[in-house]
Amino acid sequence: MPHLLDRLLDLDQLRLSEMDAAGIDMQVLSLTTPGTEQLEAGEAVPFARDTNDYLAAAVRRYPERFAAFATLPTAAPEAAADELERTVQTYGFKGALINGHSHGRYLDDPHFWPIFERAAHLQVPLYIHPTPPPQAVIDASYTGHFSAEISDGLATSGWGWHIETAIHVLRIILGGAFDRYPNLQLIICHLGEALPFMLPQLNLRFSQQLTKLQRPVSSYLRENVYYTISGFNFLPSFLTMLLEIGAECIMFSADYPFVSMEQAQTFLAQLPLSPADKARIAHANAERVLHL
């Protein structure tokens, strides 16, 4: 049996055979965490370019099976914006994936807004993907009277990086990025990183009188953010997201290779949805948002 790393790195027949077995027509490829976000600008810029050229080669080999999100050197925002434009216009990339903060700085900082401006201009989404919190946050919140292994799980896939991603999106909203760039679109994974569950409370706590934003917080979460299942094959949590967000903003994904594509397909098949909503989630929303 192939190991997880084999599956992660393969962009040829191993991946395609597992897509075929699960009945998946297309994958959108990207560089997962830690990505380039924690690199210094001088290293991040060429690394991102080389990564994107590598992904583009895979898409050229299998244009009916693969699409791609760009990797961006967020430590150099203007260069990142230029790299986004290069990959979209030259390679037909569908947007970019950003693995969270950059050296502890978040995208609500106007320093990064050239990336937002270019994404909005190009009409492509930015996928905000989890990454471990800054070390100071790990030390303060996720290190305790338990093993290092538990601390690591608490800070990452067990809890921390999901909440970290939710906080990141809220900072982008509350910092006014969507008012500045109303066409900006984000994607987040894992059933919305707990944001759908908290949406009513967020509206209650962050009134427009307080935020001075043009719309309620829920409006941005429902109109500027899209949500993927991404291996969180949990029916009650999915139904919460469906009720709060709506089927028009949910997209199927498997979180391969961390969760098998067959498991993801099985979960999708048993969801209590109308045929129209199931089609939206299975493919139509992605076709619309990603221009597939």
Image (cartoon, rainbow, N blue to C red):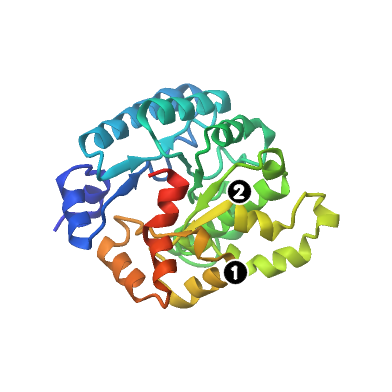
Q: Residue furthest front?
A: 276
Residue bearing mark 2: 136
Quarter that holds the C terminus: top left
Q: Foreground residue, 68 or 190?
A: 68
Q: Residues within 10 Å of mark 1 (few under 14, many from 20)?
A: some
Instruction: Give the residue type that dot 2 points to.
Output: Ala
Answer with mark 2 or mark 1, whichever residue precedes in sequence.
2
* Element carrying mark 2: helix
Residue 64 located left or right of residue 45: left
Residue bearing mark 1: 244
At horizontal 52% and vertical 23% (from top left) the residue drawn is 79
**Front: mark 2 or 1:** 1
Residue 154 in view in this figure:
no
Dot 2 and dot 1 residues touching (CB under 8 Å): no
* Element carrying mark 1: helix
At horizontal 49% and vertical 36% (from top left) the residue drawn is 38
Residue 182: percent from the left, percent from the top?
66, 42
